[in-house]
Image (spheres, helix red, strand yellow):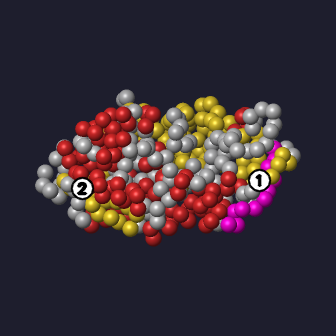
């Protein structure tokens, strides 16, 4: 391959996954350049880590300030909480920023491919996106909304490895990230305190309201519906004698509804703004459906309709949360292929 044919831009975060992915690509003969994305004012430490990695690998590092573009992610994040929904900014960011703006930048600099440290796999001649080999680390879910046309241009080197293997390889490559702590934080939320960020940006969210049960009986008070998510059990400060969970959030009425476990179990959902990584299906099909990032998935019938899909599960699913993503997988030989996703809108009752 010529230099242009094997030129890869790697989204370098400063962590062990993206740095190891870069080292693997270099080992395999790819011409790599790194890109660090500034998405918030809190990026200084991560940028310094990315600069160290680039120096260790002898690679050029581009620093791309995307804070203005990232305002769309922030607006989405705040708007969803105002509606009483639970957003998934990583899914939204992957479509608009990482596999959108960053890819445009890479193309303009002669790149043929874009690589990331996600634990997922592109196989079958770059036409299919699949779960990682290690299901416990799989990150394919957060890629469900990227554009189908991107798939031939994506390389995901980490999809065949476990986290332990990644750290072993990082040490073998001499990377200082080999023992770095794994971050579970949202990149623009300092100290993972999303409530503080929301209340600073949207002070109107802080208002007292009632906590009720499904019959409307008042159980207590809250200081803002943004502090709750469907299925939440901890931090409710309501003693009922048995476990109670958040079953409904009504932003307009400023109420949070609690109930026992059976009231967060649903067997149907509607998802809107669907995105397909295959030719758009027009008839019902069977799939494994994940309703959150750490879900193992539940088998269901997926029914495409004009501008949304209905999903009917084989068995009730816990805490289906409006604002989160429903991701659809089909079995191909020994692999689970991600074929699309949609934003969970509601969970209608099957009559």
Q: Quadrant of the C terminus?
A: top right
Q: Say whether residue 114 is left or right of residue 134.
A: left
Classify 10 Å Cα crowding around label 2: few (below 14), some (14-19), many (20 and above).
few
Looking at marks 2 and 1 on the same chain, the residue that comes earlier in the sequence is marked by 2
Q: Secondary structure at mark 2?
A: helix
Q: Residue at x 78, y 32 (%)?
A: 242
Q: CA distance from mark 2 to mark 1?
A: 50 Å
Is the residue marked by circle 1 packed among few (<14), some (14-19), or many (20+) residues within 10 Å? Answer: some
Q: Position of residue 142 (x, y in %)?
A: 46, 48
Image coordinates for residue 131, horizontal then vertical, percent: 40, 38
* Residue at the extreme bottom of the image, as rendered: 68
Picture residue at 23% right of the left edge, 60% below the top: 60
* Left-right relation of 76 to 7: right
Magenta segment boundaries in residue numbering = 203-213
220 falls in the magenta region: no
Could you tell me which residue is drawn at 24 percent across and 55 percent down? 55
Is 133 placed above or below 178 here? above
Q: Which residue is mark 1?
A: 222
- Looking at the image, which is closer to me, 69 or 64? 64
Kindly give the residue lying farthest to the right in the view shown. 217
Q: Which residue bears the numbered disc 2?
A: 55
């Amino acid at each position: 391959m010529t230099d242009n044919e094997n030129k890869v831009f790697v989204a370098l975060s400063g962590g062990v996954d993206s740095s190891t992915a870069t080292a693997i690509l270099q080992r395999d003969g790819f011409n790599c350049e790194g890109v660090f994305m500034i998405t918030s004012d809190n990026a200084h430490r991560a940028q310094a880590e990315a600069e160290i990695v680039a120096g260790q690998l002898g690679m050029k590092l581009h620093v791309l300030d995307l804070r203005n573009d990232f305002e769309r992610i922030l607006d989405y994040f705040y708007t969803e909480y105002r509606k009483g929904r639970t957003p998934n900014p990583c899914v939204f960011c992957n479509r608009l920023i990482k596999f959108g703006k960053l890819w445009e930048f890479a193309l303009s600099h002669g790149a043929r491919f874009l690589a990331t440290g996600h634990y997922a796999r592109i196989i079958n001649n770059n036409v299919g996106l699949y779960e990682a080999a290690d299901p416990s680390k799989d990150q394919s879910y957060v890629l469900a909304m990227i554009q189908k046309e991107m798939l031939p241009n994506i390389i995901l080197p980490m999809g065949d490895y476990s986290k332990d293997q990644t750290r072993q390889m990082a040490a073998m490559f001499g990377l200082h990230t080999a023992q770095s702590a794994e971050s579970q934080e949202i990149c623009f939320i300092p100290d993972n305190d999303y409530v503080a960020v929301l209340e600073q940006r949207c002070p109107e969210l802080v208002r007292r309201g009632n906590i009720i049960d499904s019959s409307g009986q008042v159980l207590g008070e809250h200081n803002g519906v943004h502090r709750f998510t469907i299925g939440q059990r901890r931090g409710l400060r309501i003693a009922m004698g048995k476990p109670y969970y958040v079953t409904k959030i009504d932003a307009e009425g400023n109420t949070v509804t609690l109930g026992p476990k059976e009231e967060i179990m649903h067997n149907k959902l509607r998802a809107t703004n669907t995105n397909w990584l295959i030719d758009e299906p027009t008839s019902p099909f069977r799939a494994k459906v994940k309703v959150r990032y750490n879900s193992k998935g539940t088998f269901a019938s997926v029914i495409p309709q004009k501008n949304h899909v209905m999903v009917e599960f084989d068995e009730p699913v816990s805490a289906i949360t409006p604002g989160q993503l429903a991701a659809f997988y089909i079995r191909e030989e020994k692999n689970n292929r991600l074929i699309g996703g949609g934003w969970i809108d509601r969970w209608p009752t099957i009559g």
